Amino acid sequence: MHPLHPLSDQEMHRAIAVVREYPELPPNLLFETVELEEPAKQEVRSHRPGDPVRRRARLVVFPAETIGAWHVVVGLDEGEVLSVTHYPAARPMIQPEQLAGIEDLVRADPAFIEACGRRGITDMNRVMCDPWSAGRFGHGDEENRHVCHVFCWVRPEEGENFYAYPLEGLNAVVDIRRLQVLQVDDHGVTPVPGGSHEYASGSREPRSDLRAIDIVQPDGVSFELDGHRITWHEWELVIGFNGREAVTLHDIRYGGRPVVYRASIAEMVVPYGSPDRAHYRKNVFDVGEYGAGKLANSLRLGCDCLGAIRYLDAWVTDIHGDLVRIDNAICIHEEDAGILWKHRDQRSGQVEVRRARRLVISSIITVGNYDYGYYWYLHLDGSIEFDMKATGIINTTACVPGEPARHGREVAPGVVGQIHQHLFCARLDMAVDGDANTAIECNTQVEPPERNPWGNAYFEEETVLESETVAARRANPATQRYWKVVNTNRKNVVGRPTGYRLEPTSCVTPFVLPGSPSGTRSAFTRNHLWVTAHDRSERFPAGEFVNQSDGSDGVATWIEQDRPLVNADLVLWHVFGLHHQPRTEDFPVQPCAPCGFRLMPSGFFDRNPCLDLPG
Ligand code: NI
């Protein structure tokens, strides 16, 4: 087994059993996550196929009724707890199993029933309550509790799209641990919008003018999967998965040369722009507060994925420490990707053209109303691309038709989508030709007049990002800014260091004020690039425990150490996303809105690496 292979169900089972019997932890423990405690890099690098592997599990567990959590590392060979760290103020991720209980609790609350009555709703089974992470706003009664904040909708008929019918102005605060409704807030009645906004099959006659497209690979696929280790073309890597990050990629190599040691989408936050009523609270960290992996879908052939597909299942724990298998959580396949290169010799008429294809590794998660497609692409030419496809249903509120507030747009009469952003952070533990790397910022500048007699002169300026505080950077389209990671110990055909560049293709400006309650907690969104010296304990840019966090943990704090970055083991934190002013076309269900980034070889190869593809 490869040392980075995710924990098997048997290993998870064993780890949970060891933790349950550990005398220094309380007996009624609840479980947030259990995942592989990844071995140190040296251990992975020195591993040869067939070597014995030391397996360890990392768990986050928490008490049933109070705040706090423990990190536990279990040695699976020894069958014993190796370390326990207590975080007394921590709130773990909100667990999927808690959501229905919170909804039931709110629906049974007398003050809430009364508020629904003021809106003409008496059948409480038709009221839908989505628990949102509550944030940290200094409300005194929430400080020592783990709370969530509830927004509500009504489902007029069974199976209807309830997000079209917001119960605007009706909210509740719930203590998740003690299962108590702490308060019900009725900010006043706004009429529930009408109309039909269905999207399900069966809600309309499907058109019949599109004929079948089949993806056929008569000779089979060109990749090989050995457990979670995949090889394809010149690429090799290990595919991981955990309850928090969902899919992770490890030890990515091209032609045997290391490129990236570990890649994941380590956090995402969705800040909304409305100060009205309770909407200021909406600033949700979908990875750190809910766990992307726990929300992964089971993918279906012919629907989510088309063609010759290989799937990987994933195992996660539920809140009680029982294992849940997510069938087909990760989809792997090849896609034709148009032409890779072409030239026609105008004199001779000779044409040379090569087809491109890409290997796709994907997962789809559902977080309440939104769905996110994670698509990692490996290209023949050495590029690695990530595409996040945001789809699902926008978060809806209601207004008097024709009178939306300035912080949103009507997407249907009386239905409002508020302005918001989806900000993601990729954690890219780079390894360009090894671990000793240097990060460089590239800006294109116009020459000063004395060097620019014809007014056409411009050049690219390279600046080494020497330490962490100077490596906190924003994108700048005016200078065609990008960043690259080079290995100065390895030179290419023209004597320059080998490298990979990060193309920041989806940078958005953050609008939450830095010192504000939500801005403090999402400090990682202030820059589009952070570079840190590798520390395996630094995994999550908004901190380890994000629910009701105070913002003191995370990448903005780590860089205060100002560690040197030259010829060092580097981690890039790339913040990218979508700026979303909702459109009528985003409703009642949103066509995929993509955002992402691309890592491209830049002096890594001595020439186009795809000359040997068949013509
Ligand atoms: Ni959106």
Image: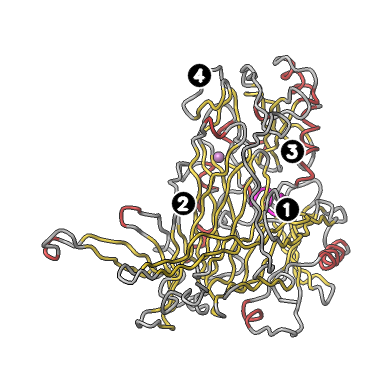
The residue singled out by tag 3 in the image is 175
- Residue at disc 1, secondary structure: loop
Upstream in sequence: badge 1 or badge 3: 3
The residue singled out by tag 4 in the image is 403
- The amino acid marked with disc number 4 is Glu
The 10 Å Cα crowd at callout 3, few under 14, some 14 to 19, many 20 or more, is some
Upstream in sequence: badge 1 or badge 4: 1
The 10 Å Cα crowd at callout 2, few under 14, some 14 to 19, many 20 or more, is some
Distance between the Cα atoms at labels 4 and 3? 34 Å
- Pair 2/3: label in front: 2
- Residue 545 x/y as whole percent: 65, 53
Quick check: 235 left or right of 460?
Answer: right
- The amino acid marked with disc number 1 is Leu
Whether residue 211 is visible? yes
The residue singled out by tag 2 in the image is 506
Distance between the Cα atoms at labels 1 and 4? 44 Å
Question: Foreground residue, 486 or 282?
Answer: 486
In which of the image's four quarters is ligand 1 placed? top right
Whether residue 166 is visible? no
The residue singled out by tag 1 in the image is 301
Please tell me whether residue 527 is drawn above or below residue 157 in the rendered image: below
Distance between the Cα atoms at labels 4 and 2? 32 Å
For image coordinates 77% across by 57% down, the residue present is 316
Quick check: 424 left or right of 4?
Answer: left
